[in-house]
Image (cartoon, helix red, strand yellow):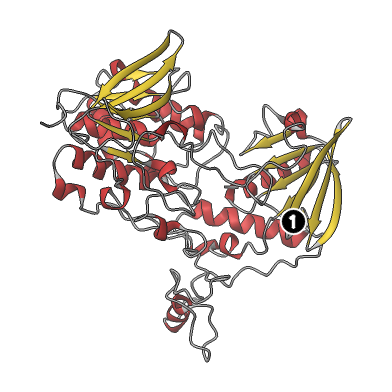
Amino acid sequence: MMVSADLPVAVIGAGPVGLAAAAHLVERGIRPLIFERGAGVGAALLEWSHVRVFSPWTYNVDMAARALLERSGWRAPDRDGLPTGGEIVRDYLAPLAALPEIAPNLKLGTSVTAVTRLGHDKISNRNRQESPFVVQYEDAAGEHRVLARAVIDASGTWSRPNPIGVDGLAVPGEQMGAGRIAYGIPDVTGVLRSDYAGKRVLVIGGGHSAINVALALMELQGEAPDTEIFWALRRNGVEKLLGGGLNDQLPERGALGLAAKQAIDRGRLNMLAPFAVDRVETTGDSLAVEATLAGEPFSLSVDRIVVATGFRPDLSFLGELRVALDPVVEAPPALAPLIDPNFHSCGTVPPHGIEELAHPEPGFVIVGSKSYGRAPTFLMATGYEQVRSVVAEIAGDHRAAREVRLALPETGVCSAEGITGASGCCGGPAPVEVDACCVKDADAKAKGAAGCGCGTANKIEARELIAEGSHA
């Protein structure tokens, strides 16, 4: 006996990837049931609504969603335009969610608290695969349960930012100072301007989010010259981030790195690396930061801290499902080697689908940024390809589920620094007689190009308190 095809497919999360999954289900004649914790769709994007994304609209609209929208008379934004998070919600997600194929199946203000199999706990085997899923959720009216034939978890990671500590824990005093500590990409030049103008601000993080924050603070500094910016890297080196530059096939991503590099060179930002916070103490209107800088004790007094050190998945409601995750990055085991930042240093990740995303619980899949676990570099277009494949598998179209229908833009960044004995994504180290950092760099130079991009950024010295800039 199979799970009834009359049951809906539960989709957890109404962000870009979750709504794309819903659109693909509709396209396949399968009813989605979408759960969204926020008051509206794209709730996480609205928290960084002021931030302009790297990728143009052509990468940000799912093909099945586009087909549904165009049948309703929707006019697509300029394919080459670069939207903000708020514009993605306003011009794409909100119209998609309002369609008659989607709206009746969308539950807003709803938190999924557990997913299991009907009549089965995690260890129960008998007739497990023939039993439907049970999705337990809470809304303003109380607690409810609903049955589903499959579950697609597209709930993202935004609700669980990484704390300050390099050991993955909040440092002593971090919770006490929460009123002066922000996570992610706060709108420092907009609604939160008064919190940051003329203040001493510490930005912690080595990714694109940290760069975005630092560059926005520099813009604010132009209007409020007393604003002081400190950028702290928890580890040495930002070559991977800054090195792509003009080699990046997403120009805005490359430009962001170049802008940060210029800020570093011009002394606009105070650089701290490698930097590890030991504790934070709230003292009146300021935060006293006790840290270790390049192995030596270091203290700093600031007014605000912005923590841009990435995110981690919320796995709390999946405890009764058989979920297989890599022990390092918390991604599916087949996907993890493609994205593990310890080994995969290129921003480019090959398109992937159900084969890489499958779990020991048939019918359950994690997609979107949550499928990457703790790893960075996720692109919206990657999530769209994921759900296309996953929904094809649910529909029984196994051939389509295993096709690759996406070409992702290259980052122009490829670095094997810190990898010992691993071939990495650059093809391994270059021959010793060649002036190149890796095989890919050597091949590029042999063809007359400047290189693969990994060696273009200057090394950042650990002990210097010098100028710098930073996003994630």
Residue 284 visible in the displayed image = yes
> Whole-percent x and y of residue 186?
65, 35
Between 78 and 399, which is closer to the camera in this rendering? 399
Residue that carries the numbered disc 1 in the rendered image: 275
- Image quadrant where one finds the N terminus: top left
Asked if 97 appears above or below 241 in the picture, the reply is above
How crowded pointer 1 is (Cα within 10 Å; few <14, some 14-19, many 20+) is rated as many
**Figure quadrant of residue 387:** top left
> Whole-percent x and y of residue 48?
56, 34
> For the residue labelled by badge 1, is the local secondary structure a helix, a strand or a loop?
strand
Residue found at x 79% / y 63% = 295
Residue found at x 80% / y 41% = 280
Asked if 357 appears above or below 99 in the picture, the reply is below
**Figure quadrant of residue 301:** top right
Asked if 93 appears above or below 262 in the picture, the reply is above
Q: What amino acid is found at the position of numbered circle 1 in the picture?
A: Phe
The extreme bottom residue here reads 433
Asked if 122 appears above or below 381 in the picture, the reply is above
Between 353 and 464, which is closer to the camera in this rendering? 353
Between 321 and 397, which is closer to the camera in this rendering? 321
Residue 199 visible in the displayed image = no
